[in-house]
Structure formats: C-alpha cells, structure tokens
Amino acid sequence: MSTKPSKELEVVPNPHPDRDYEVRIECPEFTALCPKTGQPDFAVIYFRYIPGPWIVELKSLKLYLWSFRDEGHFHEDVTNRILKDFVTAAQPRWLEVIGEFNVRGGIYTTVRAVYQDPGWTPDPSVAQSLVAPAWPRRRSG
Amino acid sequence: MSTKPSKELEVVPNPHPDRDYEVRIECPEFTALCPKTGQPDFAVIYFRYIPGPWIVELKSLKLYLWSFRDEGHFHEDVTNRILKDFVTAAQPRWLEVIGEFNVRGGIYTTVRAVYQDPGWTPDPSVAQSLVAPAWPRRRSG
Amino acid sequence: MSTKPSKELEVVPNPHPDRDYEVRIECPEFTALCPKTGQPDFAVIYFRYIPGPWIVELKSLKLYLWSFRDEGHFHEDVTNRILKDFVTAAQPRWLEVIGEFNVRGGIYTTVRAVYQDPGWTPDPSVAQSLVAPAWPRRRSG
Amino acid sequence: MSTKPSKELEVVPNPHPDRDYEVRIECPEFTALCPKTGQPDFAVIYFRYIPGPWIVELKSLKLYLWSFRDEGHFHEDVTNRILKDFVTAAQPRWLEVIGEFNVRGGIYTTVRAVYQDPGWTPDPSVAQSLVAPAWPRRRSG
Amino acid sequence: MSTKPSKELEVVPNPHPDRDYEVRIECPEFTALCPKTGQPDFAVIYFRYIPGPWIVELKSLKLYLWSFRDEGHFHEDVTNRILKDFVTAAQPRWLEVIGEFNVRGGIYTTVRAVYQDPGWTPDPSVAQSLVAPAWPRRRSG
Amino acid sequence: MSTKPSKELEVVPNPHPDRDYEVRIECPEFTALCPKTGQPDFAVIYFRYIPGPWIVELKSLKLYLWSFRDEGHFHEDVTNRILKDFVTAAQPRWLEVIGEFNVRGGIYTTVRAVYQDPGWTPDPSVAQSLVAPAWPRRRSG
Amino acid sequence: MSTKPSKELEVVPNPHPDRDYEVRIECPEFTALCPKTGQPDFAVIYFRYIPGPWIVELKSLKLYLWSFRDEGHFHEDVTNRILKDFVTAAQPRWLEVIGEFNVRGGIYTTVRAVYQDPGWTPDPSVAQSLVAPAWPRRRSG
Amino acid sequence: MSTKPSKELEVVPNPHPDRDYEVRIECPEFTALCPKTGQPDFAVIYFRYIPGPWIVELKSLKLYLWSFRDEGHFHEDVTNRILKDFVTAAQPRWLEVIGEFNVRGGIYTTVRAVYQDPGWTPDPSVAQSLVAPAWPRRRSG
Amino acid sequence: MSTKPSKELEVVPNPHPDRDYEVRIECPEFTALCPKTGQPDFAVIYFRYIPGPWIVELKSLKLYLWSFRDEGHFHEDVTNRILKDFVTAAQPRWLEVIGEFNVRGGIYTTVRAVYQDPGWTPDPSVAQSLVAPAWPRRRSG
Amino acid sequence: MSTKPSKELEVVPNPHPDRDYEVRIECPEFTALCPKTGQPDFAVIYFRYIPGPWIVELKSLKLYLWSFRDEGHFHEDVTNRILKDFVTAAQPRWLEVIGEFNVRGGIYTTVRAVYQDPGWTPDPSVAQSLVAPAWPRRRSG
Ligand SMILES: [Ca+2]
Ligand SMILES: [Ca+2]
Ligand SMILES: [Ca+2]
Ligand SMILES: [Ca+2]
Ligand SMILES: [Ca+2]
Ligand SMILES: [Ca+2]
Ligand SMILES: [Ca+2]
Ligand SMILES: [Ca+2]
Ligand SMILES: [Ca+2]
Ligand SMILES: [Ca+2]
Ligand SMILES: [Ca+2]
Ligand SMILES: [Ca+2]
Ligand SMILES: [Ca+2]
Ligand SMILES: [Ca+2]
Ligand SMILES: [Ca+2]
Ligand SMILES: [Ca+2]
C-alpha cells in the first residue's frame, strides 16, 4: 500500500460476517479548505458501522482522509460525500458518519448522516444501538 | 453579504435533499436585554435540524443572532421566536432550538422548543435521534 | 413583587401555549431544616416542565424556595410537596422535580417526582423527552 | 435507634404512597472481606427504588451496610443479597441495586440487580426511567 | 489455580440463577501483537453479561487475557474471538464485549460485539438495559 | 455539646504540637443574608491552618458556621471576621480562610485572608506550602 | 445607584484596611465590538486585587463592564484600560486583570496585566500569591 | 509474608541509594473507627517519600493500613502516627503523609504532615519538589 | 492584508509599552508534513509573550502558521523556528512557544522553547510568571 | 531502523544546541513482568529533558520501551534504570523520568527520578521549570 493521499478506500474481508457487530472509528486529523475563502478548515470525523462483506483497512482510511487536504468542501456536503464513498467501498449493513468542525465565526457546526442497507434487517441485539446517535459532546457554552 | 445585524436568515440549497441528515449548530455568543430591567442577558443558543430544501448560511445566522443585541426579550418567548424565524427561512423537516441562559438570581433557566414538518415522516435511521432531546449538561449543583 | 420569602408562586401567561415546549430550571440554593435534629439541610432543586396556561415567574420561584429556610422537612416529602405546589400554581402539562440533597452520614440521597396532566397527550416531539429522566450526575464513588 | 451494625433495616411510612416517585441513594463507604483471602474489599453501593408502603430510614441503612464489615462475601452474591434484604424490609414497587467494587488484579467489577413487584404496573411517567439502567461511569481505560 | 497465561476460562456456579442480573467487568491491561508489524498493541476490554449457569472466575479471566500477550490479532477479529470463548466457557444468557484499542496512525478504533442465547427471553427489568450499548467515552476530538 | 448555632468555637489540645503540620477543612454549607436586600447568600468556606496549642473541634465548627444563617454580612467583611474568630479560639500558628460566594448579578466573588502568628517561624518543610495560596478553581468562563 | 451603563466605578470603604487580603472577581459577561469589523466580541474578565482604602461595589462593576457594550476595543488595549480605570477608582495595593477573549479565526487570545502600588510592600503572607499568575485554564487543544 | 493485618512495616534495600528520587503511593482503602461514635471512618492516605536505606514493601504497606480497621483514631492524630511509623521503619530522607477523610457533618477534612531527616540536605533537583505540597484536589463547592 | 499563507508576521504598535503585560495565544490548527514519511502532522501551538515595541496581528499569525501546511518539519526544530520568527518580527521582551504534537507511534511529544531579551529586566510583577512554564495538561495515561 | 525490541536508544543531532529548550514525551504503553509473580505489569512512562548534543529518535524510544516486555522489573528500580539508559544514550543537560504504575493490591505507585549534568548551569528561562516536578494527576480518591 502506498503512503500517498488517495480517494481509494481499501477493504479486507469481514472475519465475522455471521454477526451484526459494530466498529467505531475516530479520526481527529481531518483538514480541508473552505470553498469560499480558501483557508484551512479542521474537523474530527467519526465513523460507526456494521460491516457487511468487508471491513475498512485503517491505513487506507487515513490516506483517504488525507486526500481532502487540498480540496475545497462545505461542511454539510463533505460529510455526506464521505458517507457515500464509504458505502461504495465497504458495503456496510449500516453506517453513521459525523463531521465535527472547528469553530468558525464563533459558531460550532456538526453534521451527522446515516446509511442503512435497504435489504438488511438489524439483529435485535444491535437495533437499538443503531438508532441511538453517537453525538460527540457539546463544545461551547 | 453585509456585516450588520439582520433579522434576515439567508439560506442556500440543501446539497443532499435525498437524505434525512442532521446538522447541529452551537452559538455561545447570544446576548439580548432583559425586558424588565433593561440590563444585558446572555445565552448559548443550540440548533439541531434536518434540512428540507435549504440549509442555513452560517455567517447569516451570526448576523441574525446579533440582531437581538439591543432588543428586550423574555427567555421562554425568544427561544420560540428563534424557532419560528428559522422555520420560516429554512423550511426544515425537523428543528430543535435550545436557549441556555446565564444564571440570574441564583437560578439557571434553559428552554427547549421543537418543530416537525407535519407533512414529513422521519426516516427510521433518524427517528430515534429526533425524539432524544439534546439537552446541554446541568450547570449547577 | 416583594423580596420576602413567600409560599405564593406567581405566574404569567404562557407566551406560546400552542406548542409543547420544555423549560428546565436549576436552583442550587435550597436550604431547610432537618426535622429530627433541627440542623440545616441543603439541596439543589431541579425543575423541568411543559407549560400549560402559565409560566412560572423566576423571582417568585426564588422567594418560594426561600420560604423553606426555617421549616423542617424530610427529603422524600418536601420534593413531592414542591411538585404539588408548582402544579397548583402553574397548571403545567407535565412536570418533573428532582431534589438532590447534600451528603448526610456518608449517604447521598436524591428524590425524583413527576406529574402529568391526565387530560393531556404529549406532542410526539416531546413524548420521548418526558419519559427520559433528567437525573443529575452521581456524586459519590 | 442504636449506633451499632445491624442487619435490621428500619422503615417509616411512605409520605406519598399515591405517587410512583423514585429515590436514589449512593453509599460510597461499603466494605466487607474477601471470602478467599480474608482481606478487605471496598465498594460503592447504589440504590434506586420506587417506594411502596415504606421508605427506608437512612441512618438504619448506614448501620445495615456497616454490618457487612467483618463478613466474607463474593461480589455477585452480596449485591443480590442486599437487594433481597431491601425488598423484604421495604416492600418497594421497584428496586435497583448496583455494587461497584474496587479494582482487584487490574480488573474492575460492577454488579447490577433489579427487582419489580410482580403485582405492580409502573405509572407511565416512570416506566421508561425504570428500564434505563443507572450505571456509574466506567473507571478504567 | 496457576498463575500462568491460559486460554482456559474457569467458571463457578451462578449463586443467583433465578434472576436476570448484570455483571460489568473492565480490563484495562490487554495487550497483543499487531499481525502486520509484530509490534505491541494495547486495548481495554469491557465485558457486560447476564450469567446463565456460571459466573466467570476473575483471576482466571486475567490469565485468559494474558494469554494473548504474545499472539498476533486484528482488532475486529480478536474482539469477536473473546466473545466466542466467553460464551463457550460461561454460557451466559447475554454478553457484550467491547475492545477499545489504543490510537494507531492517528485513528482510534473500538469494536463491539453482542451475543444473546437464542433460547432465552430477557426479563423486562433488564431488556432495555441490554439493548443500550455501553460504549466507552470518545477519546479524540 | 449542644446542637444549636453558636458563636463559640470549641477546641481540643493539639495531639502533635511538636510538628508544623497542616489541616485543611472545606465547608460547602455556609449561608448568611445579604445586608442590602435581606435575601439569602451562599458560600463555601475553606480553612487551612497549622495548629498551635489547639485544634478545632469539627462539630463545633459546624455550629459556628450555622450561627451566620440569620445574620446580614458583606463578602469581604465576613471572611475576615471568620479569620479573626478562628484565631481567637484556636491560636493557630498560621491560618488561611477563603470565602467562595455564589454568583450574584453574573459576578463571582472569592475572598482570601491569611493570618500568621508574628512570634512563629514556619518549619522549612511547610514554609513554601503556606505562601502558595490554595485558591479554588475558577467557576465562570 | 442607577441601572444604566456607566464608566463610573463606585467604591466603599475597605472594612479591614489593616490586612493585606485578596479579592477575586470573575465576570463572564463582557462584550464589546471589534474595532475592525464592528462585530460583537465576547470575553471573561477576571480581577484579583488587594484592597487599599476602598473595595469595589459589585453592582457598579457590572454597570462599568456594561459600558463597553457599544464601544470598539482591541484585546490588548481594553485589558490595560480596565486595569487603569480600576486603579484610579479603587487605589488598590495590587491588581491583576485578565481578559480571556472568545476564539476568533481559530485563535484564542488572553491578556494579563498587573499593577502594584509603588509605595507598598506586600505582607509576606500574600507576597508569593501575588507573583503566581492566576491564569485560566487553556481552552484549545 | 502473612496476609493478616500487621503494624509491622516491612522494607527492602533501596536499589538506587546514590540518588534522591521520589516515590508516590496512593492508598484509597483506609478505614478506621471514629473514637467518639465507634462508627467507621474512611480516608485516602497519600505517601510521597525520598528513600534512604530502604524502600517500603507494598504488600506490607497494605497489611499495615489494614491494621487500623478495628481501631479508633482521630483524623489529625492518625495522620501523624502513620508518618512516625513510616519514618521508624524505612528511615526515609523525606516523607509527606496526607490523610484525606470522607465528609462528616457536611465538612471535608484533610491533614498533611511532613518529615525531613535533619542530617540530610536535598539534592537541588528535588529540593523544590519537596516543598511543593502534593495536596489532592478540593472535593466540595 | 491578503488571505494567503505567508511567512511574513505582521505587527502593530504596542498600545501600552510602559507596562510589562502578558499575552497568551493558543492555535489549535497547526499542520505540517512529516519530513520522513511525507504524511500530515498536527499540533497545537501555544504562545505567551511580553510585548516590546510591537504586538502581533492575529490574522497575520494565522496566515503565518498556515504557511507550514505543505512543508516538512521535525517537532523539535519547528518549535524553535517559530520562536525565532516571532522574535524577529515582534521583538518581544520575553516569549514562550510550546508545540504540542499529536500522538505518533503511541508516543506524545511536546516541545517548549523560551526567549528573553538579554537587555531587559522583567518587572517584579511578571518575573515569577515568566519562569513558571505554562505546560498544557498531560494527555496520555 | 529495525522494528524489533532493542535496548539501543538511537539519537540524532540536536538541531538547536544553542538553546536550553525542553522536550516532554509521554509513553502510555509500557509493560513488563512482575519479578515476584511473573505476571504482567503496566505503566505510563513520562520523560522531560533538555537536550544536550543529541535528541532521542522517537521510533527508537518505542523499540527501547518494548524491550522490557518480557523482563522482570521492580517499580523503583526500572524507573531509575530507564533514566540511566537515557542519560548514556542522549547525554541530556537535564532529564526527569516518571513511572506511573497501574494499581496493584489497591495501591497506586509512581516513581520520579531526575538527572542533571553536573557541568551544566541551566539558563534562567528554564531553571524554575526544571525544579517544578511534572507529576501526573492523582488517580485514586
Ligand atoms: Ca442479522
Ligand atoms: Ca425520508
Ligand atoms: Ca399537543
Ligand atoms: Ca401507578
Ligand atoms: Ca488510557
Ligand atoms: Ca427471565
Ligand atoms: Ca482537539
Ligand atoms: Ca517550627
Ligand atoms: Ca462559557
Ligand atoms: Ca503590609
Ligand atoms: Ca543528595
Ligand atoms: Ca456546589
Ligand atoms: Ca520593566
Ligand atoms: Ca489509565
Ligand atoms: Ca545555558
Ligand atoms: Ca472515591
């Protein structure tokens, strides 16, 4: 695997596809550019997913997030794009992506998007867990 | 866009209207006047919403909140008014507004109001999230 | 309004009676006497309610809580009495009162009582919020 | 009332038997002996209950917990025994007992047991509260 | 009982098999090797279970976790393996295992797997507790 | 000893007068009246002292602080008065009193006063400790 | 005393001028305008002083800080100006003013200025306290 | 070594007697009896020392602290007695003992005592460390 | 002023050059590249300085830190380089720069460098503050 | 550089040998074996040093700490040994090593050792920093 930024998210086979288990991944080192001003933006990206046939390779995830470093993105849009890229690559049964962006103009913005495979019914043991949103703590006030 | 206080909340098109996703916004720099004494009041205003056709432009939201700086408002009333203004401007599918006011007379007051578009049914992936109130932490005791 | 302790809780009209919204009030300065020993007891009193025709005037609430300063009260009893007085004065749709008492004999006691107007059905947007108890954090251990 | 350790839990009449209200009690000063090694063990015991005909007298509860000081007990067993003794003495509608034991061998153990009066249906205002377990925060990691 | 690493998890009879009670165990001293690099990995392993016929002997659990010290394991896999070993040894009615792994490459990973005995229906007093995932707090951001 | 408020601070002989050791006492249950408005004020009173011939009896200290309950006092003044009363009663070698008053008008006030016996030279082992003020944490901001 | 913003800081006689004692005051509700953009700025202003002939009247201090609400000020400048105004009004033996400004452009700024009466020598009991800066906690990172 | 309570503190040779290094030991499981009421008291005992010829064996320290379980002791006295016992057994160059006692009557008491070998001059690298008291955090307020 | 990354640090005249006052600046959005791997590194940069003839313009400081975004730098080196650039631009009387770098390989690194104008003697009111290092809190363990 | 455990600590030239600057390194992933029982021990190792001719290469430091994984070590001894190895390899002007060991038998142990080059005089800007011990926070109580 290279050590260059890449929009390719690599995956490996899910070692326990018989079970609906959850994986939570926190990535505090996301940075992109503001599409209006061109200045750097910073965020923590949180993933929580139930693997389908694949699990995401972590080094590849790091390179994927690195690939946004020189691109301009709006908060609401980029969070949904990351969700879509992850779904395409890993075909999870369920996925939550949260983008927690650094304060701008005295305002703290966080975006949460969720995907659920329409052909999948969650095992009862995780069904409640999925609908409970894993929001990070509030940061202001 | 000007840099003056304004009751006009500007919006831009929702880049992902096909999905019920959530946006959380924290504004710790709200100040208005007490209608009884004329003295300054301070609050943190928290928004959480599911965008409909529009998302709120953040610089505009800052100017909007600035517009209360020289006006007199009661806690319970202003929280509901902000909810209504946001609904009018952005037509969200769902919206929660929380006003967390600074202590007065040794008493801490927080107000929470919720709007749901009557013609909208939440996607199951967010339905539970919506009814779980995003209260800030208690501050006294 | 006077500045003396008073068992009279004053109210003002609810400015938004069309909506089921919540008000949370934290009062960390409650003190009464222990009915057994006559020594001072201290507590934080937390209110959370959905206003009906009235909202509680905060300065009056302060004077009301002050009125317990020279009275003897048991923890379980006084929390329920405050609930009843609030219901009588403000006729809320729903009310939660929590009394979090200071440690005595190495033991920390907290009491939670809830009232719901039997003729009222909560709006779906607040129904889940109501049944989720707003317990303060544990203090020992 | 004496000031000696006692397995007798004293109770007084519930002042508000018409209402399903909750009482939370935290006791950070529990100590017993390890049945294997004879060395002291320490725990925080948490109670949460809905009173039936009686409420527990707090000084008596302190003497009751003191009575374990020179006895040998296993974690899982003693938590359930305390639950049973409390049920016998106070006949609560509902009771949760949590024993949070100090670290041993690098491992932190916590035990939670719940009792519900089979002939009692919880009032809707507390029903959700009861099933939400009041776990203390994690301590390791 | 020896004091050597062992894949054998020892159990003792459940002293209260008549009740669905929960046991939470936190083990902050888990270490294994990375299967790719051979370098040490560290994690906190959290267990929560409802005992069936047996409860797990804690010293044995410590020796069991020690047995991974010189083995190579992937995060997602080892968490599920620990779940399976525990189920085999203790036959719990319900079990949750969470592996909270130390940061690698700026990324924090946590894995949660759940087992429920297919022939068992949870007592209503614990049913809600089981489906509420006991995630540890977020560590980044 | 009575259980009534009393301005008499009782003392007992210092069991280790040969050593300059420190005693820290925190009293979170202080309340008096505001001399301007007559309304209740609340504070935490912190003591730190090096005993001389006497140490303060703790139950007596509680009754002493209780004696302020129905009296009017300014923040700066009452902190210094408590210092003087303690010096008169216990003749400490050194004493620090801190009054940390609850917020009023959005402003948090804390007062710190120190006494040192002019005929006493601190042992080098405590000399640095004495001049390092034991301020409580900031509460606002 | 009026309830209007005022640059006049009122004082009352120091009740204990014989002693070098410290007063700490925290004011989390400071707001002014940015001289460049005209937009609101927010800060916490912390005072710590040793009174000379006067102590500052707290309601007057609130009105004084209110007087900056509609004025444009730079961070470094306004902190020093507040120091000078306080010195002129209250003639303290020693004064520290800290302005902790809200984040702007992703950067957190705090300014600390100190005054000492050139004709005054601190009592040894406070000398060390004075030179230990009472910085608030860091907020970023 | 036995596993019974013992007033004998065992020591082993200091492996690095050529250096003035510090050892900090925290013992949160101290319990004794109140000499007035006979009821259990609880404390955390903190040690910090510079070893002389010996270092304290930790299992022995545990048995030593256990030996107070059935004895009556006053706070100020027992902290100094532990200091003296430690000095006798281990002959440290320097020792600090802090007893942080659980709240009684709403009052939190902490006692700090220090010993320094009169024939020893601290190495400059630790001299400042020694005079900086290692107080635990405040617990009330 | 442009909005592009720039190694030019702009300054404005110190509005209070007659006084030795301190300015603390926290910049949590620093990122550069690892000179070995080319992968992104992240840090918080903390400044604390006593202005000489100039104070640093904050927007310019942001652009200056941005200029490292595409450059490779070692932790120890870049912290000292930032110190030198700041000294050259602003000629402060005293300056502390702390670089708190994100975890790499399970290891957390922080670098602190200090400059003092050799021709300057600090005012006694700040002399102690300067030598007390403003370390951020530890992050691991 | 290999990726195997190694007692060889590699160094690189100090890029700023003209300045006395500090480097703080936190390593939460230290594990060794207890020399008595053979069971695993865990610790956080903290370094703080002023580089002389060399700075420590971080990947090498990781391999160095890894080399203790299968060795038996006492707490007091291993902390001093790590200090000595670091001094031999990097020849720092000053070095502090703190070993914060996980709880054993209910007791938390931390060891701090310091080295100073006898032929070096610290620059005044760091002299005070060096003697202020960088203890981690207490963990019990
Ligand atoms: Ca399934
Ligand atoms: Ca939908
Ligand atoms: Ca309705
Ligand atoms: Ca009922
Ligand atoms: Ca950790
Ligand atoms: Ca059952
Ligand atoms: Ca951060
Ligand atoms: Ca002496
Ligand atoms: Ca704030
Ligand atoms: Ca003087
Ligand atoms: Ca020496
Ligand atoms: Ca409090
Ligand atoms: Ca000067
Ligand atoms: Ca830890
Ligand atoms: Ca030098
Ligand atoms: Ca504790």
Image: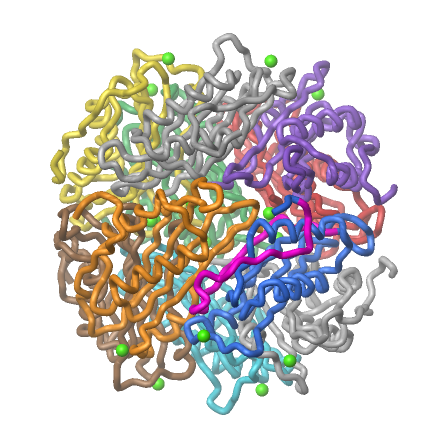
Chain colours: A orange, B blue, D cyan, E brown, F red, G purple, H green, J yellow
- Determine the image quadrant of residue G51: top right
- Determine the image quadrant of residue H14: top left
Q: Residue at x 80, y 53 (%)?
A: F39
Instruction: Name the quarter showing ligand 15.
Output: top left
Residue H7 in sight here: no
Q: Residue E125: give x, y in percent of width and height.
A: 42, 80
Q: Is residue B5 magenta?
A: yes
Residue A84 in sight here: yes
Q: Residue H132: give x, y in percent of width and height.
A: 47, 30
Q: Is residue B2 magenta?
A: no
Is D98 placed left or right of A94 in the picture? right
Q: Considering depth in this image, is E114 or A71 the residue closer to the camera?
A: A71
Q: Considering depth in this image, is B41 or E118 the residue closer to the camera?
A: B41
Q: Residue at x 29, y 55 (%)?
A: E109
User: G115 above or below B12?
Assistant: above
User: E132 above or below H30?
Assistant: below
Is D95 placed left or right of A32 in the picture? right
Q: Residue D35: give x, y in percent of width and height.
A: 30, 66
Q: How many marks?
A: 0
Q: Residue B93: give x, y in percent of width and height.
A: 54, 70
- Determine the image quadrant of residue G95: top right
Is E81 placed left or right of H126 in the picture? left
Q: Residue at x 18, y 69 (%)?
A: E85
Q: Considering depth in this image, is A41 or D68 the residue closer to the camera?
A: A41
User: E136 above or below D64?
Assistant: above
Q: Residue at x 74, y 45 (%)?
A: F8
Write down the region rendered in magenta. B4-32
